[in-house]
Amino acid sequence: MASEIAGVHDDRVSGRARCLQCGSYATQRFARVFGDNDNNLYACLECTTMRALRNGEGVCAD
Ligand SMILES: [Zn+2]
């Protein structure tokens, strides 16, 4: 039996979060700090700046 490959949109099991904007991987900790309450990350350092993330860009893509 072939084992199923983990879904690309939900990597929580592997302890990684994924940027919903550019698809880059970030740590769960990063997602918790800069993402929304559900650890959804809408921006990361690959696609935006730390300044923008601090302004809440990782919570809601705008
Ligand atoms: Zn990104």
Image (spheres, helix red, strand yellow):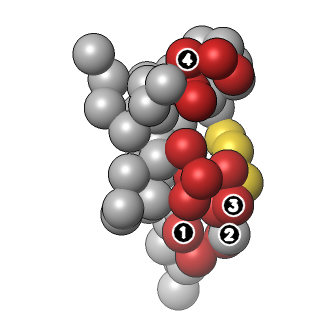
Q: Is residue 55 above or below residue 1?
A: above
Sequence order check, earlier mark of 4 and 2:
2
Q: Which residue is mark 3?
A: 29
Closer to the eye: label 4 or 2 = 4
Separation (CA) of disc 4 from disc 1: 24 Å
Is disc 3 placed on a helix, strand or loop?
helix
Closer to the eye: label 4 or 3 = 4
Q: Examine the image and state in which quarter residue 20 appears.
A: top left
Q: Residue furthest front?
A: 55
Q: Is residue 40 left or right of residue 50?
A: left
Residue 8 seen from this side: yes
Q: What is the three-letter code of the residue carrying label 1?
A: Arg
Q: Is residue 18 left or right of residue 35?
A: right
Q: What is the three-letter code of the residue carrying label 2?
A: Gly
Is the CB–ligand 1 distance for label 1 below 8 Å? no
Q: Is the C terminus in the top left, top right, bottom left or bottom right quadrant?
A: top left
Q: Residue furthest bottom?
A: 1
- Residue beneath the point at 60% across and 53% down: 33
Sequence order check, earlier mark of 4 and 1:
1
Closer to the eye: label 1 or 3 = 3
Q: Which residue is mark 4?
A: 52
- Residue beneath the point at 66% across and 70% down: 14
For the residues bearing labels 4 and 2, Cβ distance under 8 angstroms: no
Q: Is residue 62 above or below residue 5?
A: above
Separation (CA) of disc 4 from disc 3: 18 Å
Q: Which residue is mark 2?
A: 15
For the residues bearing labels 1 and 2, Cβ distance under 8 angstroms: yes
Separation (CA) of disc 1 from disc 2: 5 Å
- Observer-nearest residue: 7 or 58? 58
Separation (CA) of disc 4 from disc 2: 24 Å
Q: Which residue is mark 1?
A: 12
- Residue beneath the point at 56% across and 59% down: 32
